[in-house]
Amino acid sequence: MCKLCDEGKPQDHTDSLLDSRRDFLKAAATTGVAAAGLSLFAARPAAAKDKDKEDDDPPDDTGKPGRRYIIRGGAVMTMDPSMPHRGEFAKADVLVEGKKIVAVGPNLPVAGAAQIDATGRIVMPGFIDTHHHQFETVLRSFLADGVLINDGSGSPSGSTTYFEFILLTFAPVYRPQDVYINELFGGLSQLDAGVTTVHDVSQIHHSPQHSDAAIQALFDTGRRAAFGYFESAGAAILHTNPGNQYPQDASRIKKQWFSSSDQLVTMIMGGEVYLGNQSTDDSWTIGRNLDLQIAAHILSPFGIRPTFDLLAAGTGGNGHIGMGPDNLFIHTTGMSDTAWQRVKDVGAQVSIAFPIEMNMRHGMPPIIRMQMMGMEPSLSTDVECTMTADSFTQMRAAMNLQRMIVNQMTLDKPNGNQNLPDPRNWELPQSAMTSNDNPGFPYWPKPPAGIPAPLTTRDVLRYATMNGAKGLRLDTKTGSLTPGKEADIIILDASAINVAPLNQVPGAVVSLMDRTNVETVIVAGKIRKWKGELLDVDLPHLRKQLEASRDYVFNKAGVAQDLFSSQ
Ligand SMILES: [Zn+2]
């Protein structure tokens, strides 16, 4: 979106977010792709500067070199079990200097640091979402009832579907400015919910301008993000994207935006294997030559199982592509035992979108299989056209789905698990033997050998933090409150009406909290949300731009806006 870049004189946009945003806006104005207005961010409201409110103000210049502040007296859950007390402290402090966490522990010396009172709060690392399509923000809840692909049933769920509507109808009409405001608004919304890192699977690369708009929005959001350079969704099938430069534009994008590793936004190469062997060859080879992680959606409804077997054998694409430790596989439903073994052996990463997979017919989330193989997933929110993108929903869905299966396997074991895996018979049938090892009340069989223990709140918290960092190869920078890492921290209000009294910290976060409890959010030392308010964001203005984009996209796609559409 930079004029000089457009003229073939690539500019470095990475040194200053402010400058790069100005470049984007200036170029956007000259090239006529400007969104409805130019003032995307506002100064903090004057009210916040009132004298009586001064005590409530955040410390100044957070995240700047040498600037110290201490988060005082909260229940601290570092998610780093190698630290003292397993990294769990009923009452402790977190000292931040510049971008980094300097120390965690009880009664740290203040040493001239500004103080943030965290009494009655839970202090933990920000959540990490390893797969999210932020370009779909204007389509929020449009597909709340739909499944992946039209199933010919004529039912409400089977008729208005993801493939036909989101990919083939809406995605092709997006302009660069639609991409920008969708990405920005969706990103700020997740930041507000305490998700400090995202892998944005932007499949909306109809042209290099679309790509630049997505990346610019990720930088402007001001949180940690992996930009996933995927294909030109829908438009590539319909051939309505003459400007499409995927995948070869990856080289320019990497050079122009990602030459520094010391920035919040990094890059992942999209390498979908359902686009044909040539595309697999091209995208995986380009990604590997650029030393990028390579991500792909892997799911049985797209007929990927035989393709995945070839990748496991090292004979994928046109014959020579194999999976490696640089792969991030999304969903991974319905794959063969052999392929799974290879995923484990090479150390590839797996991201599960529990609620979406359960809802949209991707197949059973492969959590039990992964546990039985000694593997763990990270969590991903996927699409807000169908489901909310907060991590509380993710963690609860993961835990409940896994427990539903394990609990039913336990109850059914005395009957030889005869009813599994047919889900229609997962409840105990009338003919079942109910007095196998201990007759009478209670009917409460011992968990059978060989099935995993039910997931715990700590487990899913680990999935939503450290595993996410590992999944995006960012675990030296984020994922836990380990001194030396960058300060991606959330402060959660445990005194709120839906949580008090605080009895168990992991349980309070996973089982009780929602986004209203996310009080303060810090990214790389910089406070982005303070006591319930996102800082430096003109939300009404951004919402107006988002609504204008929504109106354009629906109109251009020929889909009527209907607040009570029955799909
Ligand atoms: Zn996806």
Image (cartoon, rainbow, N blue to C red):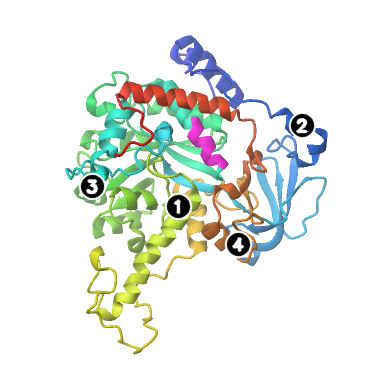
The stretch in magenta equals 184-192
Give the mark nearest the N terminus, 1 or 2. 2
Q: Is mark 3 on a helix, strand or loop?
A: helix
Residue 86, picture quadrant = bottom right
Proximity of marks 1 and 3: CB atoms separated by less than 8 Å: no
- Tell me residue 497's x, y (percent): 63, 55
Residue 549, picture quadrant = top left
Indicate the amino acid at tag 1.
Gln
The residue that appears at 64% across and 38% down in the rendered structure is 533
Give the mark nearest the N terminus, 4 or 3. 3
The disc placed on residue 49 is: 2
Neighbourhood count class around disc 2 (C-alpha, 10 Å): few under 14, some 14–19, many 20 upward: few
| Residue mark closest to the camera, 4 vs 2 | 2
Q: What element carries label 1?
A: helix
User: Residue most toward the bottom?
Assistant: 439
Above or below — where is 324 with respect to 261?
below
Indicate the amino acid at tag 3.
Pro
Pick whichever, 34 or 305, lies toward us: 34
Q: Mark 3 points at which residue?
A: 301
Proximity of marks 1 and 2: CB atoms separated by less than 8 Å: no
The disc placed on residue 394 is: 1
Residue 413, picture quadrant = bottom left
In this rendering, does residue 349 appear at all? no
- Tell me residue 536's x, y (percent): 64, 30
The residue that appears at 25% across and 74% down in the rendered structure is 429
Q: Name the residue under label 4.
A: 505
